Every structure is written in C-alpha cells, then in structure tokens.
Amino acid sequence: MSNDVEFMQSSGLGIITLNRPGALNALSTDMCRAIDEKLAAWDVDKGIKAVVIRGGGGKAFCAGGDVRAIVEQGHENNTKAQEFFATEYKMNARIFHFSKPFIALLDGITMGGGVGVSIHGSHRIVTENTLFAMPEAAIGLIPDVGGSYFLPRFPGATGLYLGLTGARLKGADTLYVGIGTAYMQSDKLAEFIHSLEENDISSDDDVDAIVAQFADDPGSAPLDEFRDLIDAVFSEKTVEDIFDHLSIIDHDWARQTLAVLKKMSPISLKVIIEQLERGRSLEFDDCMIMEYRIVSAISSYDSDFYEGVRAVLIDKDHNPNWIPPTLGEVTHEMVMTHFDVPASGDLLL
Ligand code: QUE
C-alpha cells in the first residue's frame, strides 16, 4: 500500500488526502491503485455517505501524474508506462461512475492527472489558490485523464484552447468553463468539511445546500474578455489554420498564444486536435479507451514525451528537441497511428 495517499473515515465521510508534497502530490501507480480500491469499497459501504479528496502540504492539490518516474523506465520497456496509465484511467472512470457525492477541494495547483482525480466527481470547490492547467502538449503528451470527454464539453472552443496551449486558469475562470462548481475562501475549507461531517448528505442536492452556506463570489472571469477571439481561432479545423488565424490578429493575446503554441510538440498538437474532435461524440468510457490507445503509442517509441519530460522536469532546460520539429513534417499517417489498438490490447474498464 502506498503511504503517499491517506484515507480516513469521519462521521460517514470518506476523506482522501494526497500526501506527497515533495512532488506536488503527483500520482504514482500505487497511489492510483490505492484510491481506486478504496473508492470501490466506499461505493458499496453503507457507512459512507460521501467522499472528499484534498491535497496535503499546502501548495498543490495535485500537479499531475508521476511522468518523471514513467519516463525514467524508457520506451524499450513501456509495460510500466502502460500499467500507470491503465491504473490511473480506471481510477478516473471509478470517480466518473461513483454513486455518491464526490467533493474535490482544489485548493492549489491542479494540473493534468490532478484534474482527472477531481473533475469527474459531483463537486469541485475552487479557492483563491486554485491554479488549473492541462499542460501536456508541453511535454509531448496529450490532455488525458478524460480530457477527450470534458474539454470538448467546455463552452465554445475553450476546451481546445486549454488543451493545446496549456493555459493556466485561476478560480473565477475555472467556474466560467465548468472545472469548478463553487468558489470558497480557503480558510473556510476546514469548517466546510466539518459541516459535511455533521449533516445528513445522501444526495448531491444536500451537498449543494451546504456548499451554498460557505460559497463566495469568485469575481469576474478574465477569460470572458478573450472568449470571442478564442472561439473564432479555436474553431478552426487544423492546427495550421489555428496558427494562420492567430498570425493575422493584431492583438497581444493572439501574439502570446501563437508564441506558446510554437513551443509545444508539433505531433502532440495534431494528435490533440484529432483526439478532442473524436471525444466530442464519444461516451466517457470510450474516451478513456481512446486515450489509452494514444498514450500506449506515445510510450512505445522514442517519442516527444520522453524528450519533453527530460527538457521540462528532469534537466529543466526547457529546450526540447521535438521530432519532427515542424507542423508541416507531421503527416496524417503519423497522427493516425496514435489511434490504433495497442499490440497488448485495449484498456479494460
Ligand atoms: C506538463 C505536464 C506535467 C508537468 C509539467 C508540464 C505533468 C506533471 C508534472 C509534475 C510536476 C511536479 C512534479 C511532478 C510532476 O509537471 O503532467 O512529479 O513534482 O505531472 O509542463 O503534463
């Protein structure tokens, strides 16, 4: 059993604390498996009325998956990578299908895998410390953990914008797109948990009533100012058209967004636009199966994922050598092979 995640029961509330602050609570295979097994038990345990998940250490809710550990295994043996993604995605699906209120306290950094361990639940409480992103294109990966499902369902084209650029959002913006369901000052969270313990909460509506007692006004969402630009640019059908569209807009937002996209893995960008277009019309479980196909492909060769994690998380030179280096060299066939069934078979949910 992993001791990087703690479980406790208090007055019928199951409380999960991600407790690996040295790695910003990044999820390991063991942590994902432990959470999945505990949720399976709590789902059918009559003594559990609801589940709360939070991050320990004061800085992060959860920075993502422990991609550094996966990359250190190397692509020659991607069994460990596949085991990590399969375990993580089964846990994501467990949360999606969980039958009781599942309340995530996103009081800090919430990126990648941290989004997957929260957004599929019924309630996501955000605070003044919440910092959300799906930044995987910067490490040659894709916005997974259900990104195929939730990103295309965000308003307008905001989901593709967030998935391609890795843009970071704070509290008000997370409510605007639907990542957060309520805003609370972080100093109220302890009282909020106490109230969940004290009250009879058999339904999501019961939780809503308690949330309402503690909720604060998040203020206006900065993202709204750029919403027309985002929708115009990110409803283009190809990455090249998005780049072209950004390049003809005389606006700082467009210049900055284009500069960010130019630093991302070209192959990731093209796989992501295809992934999110497919995910738009897929059921949740089929999104997870598709994502497992993509990450199995990405982890099976010396891909941009290994180079991206080296450049961003290991050597920290932030100067990845993407292969191929330009969008024009990424062929349709290179993109499509990421959607093939892995040699070892599909994810079994
Ligand atoms: C893109 C990502 C991740 C990232 C940085 C990116 C990611 C992830 C981490 C991360 C951060 C701190 C840690 C850690 C991992 O960073 O998925 O173990 O201590 O998990 O630009 O997708």
Image (cartoon, rainbow, N blue to C red):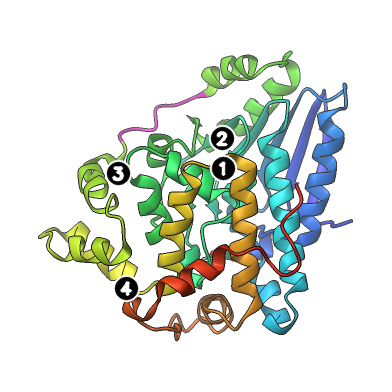
Residue at the spot of label 3: 223
Q: 330 above or below 53? A: below
**Residue positioned 54% across, 17% down in the render:** 213
Q: Secondary structure at mark 2?
A: strand
Q: Secondary structure at mark 3?
A: helix
Q: Please state which amino acid type lies under the numbered disc 3.
A: Leu
Q: Is residue 107 visible?
A: yes
Determine contact: label 4, label 2, CB under 8 Å: no
Task: Specify the quadrant of the image occupied by residue 259.
Answer: bottom left
Distance in Å between CA atoms under marks 4 and 1: 30 Å
Q: Please state which amino acid type lies under the numbered disc 1.
A: Leu
Q: 223 above or below 143? A: above
Camera-side mark, 1 or 2: 2
Q: Is residue 330 left or right of residue 279?
A: left
Please report whichever mark, 1 or 2, sits nearer to the chain's N-terminal start.
1
- Looking at the image, how many numbered discs can be counted on the residues? 4
> Which span of residues is magenta-colored?
215-220
Residue at the spot of label 2: 124
Front-most of 240 and 159? Answer: 240
Percent position of residue 327, x then y: 34, 75
Q: Please state which amino acid type lies under the numbered disc 2.
A: Arg
Q: Is residue 265 visible?
A: no
Label placed on residue 106: 1
Distance in Å between CA atoms under marks 1 and 2: 7 Å
Camera-side mark, 3 or 1: 3
Q: 279 above or below 325? A: above
Q: Is residue 144 left or right of residue 246?
A: right
Distance in Å between CA atoms under marks 4 and 2: 32 Å
Please report whichever mark, 3 or 4, sits nearer to the chain's N-terminal start.
3
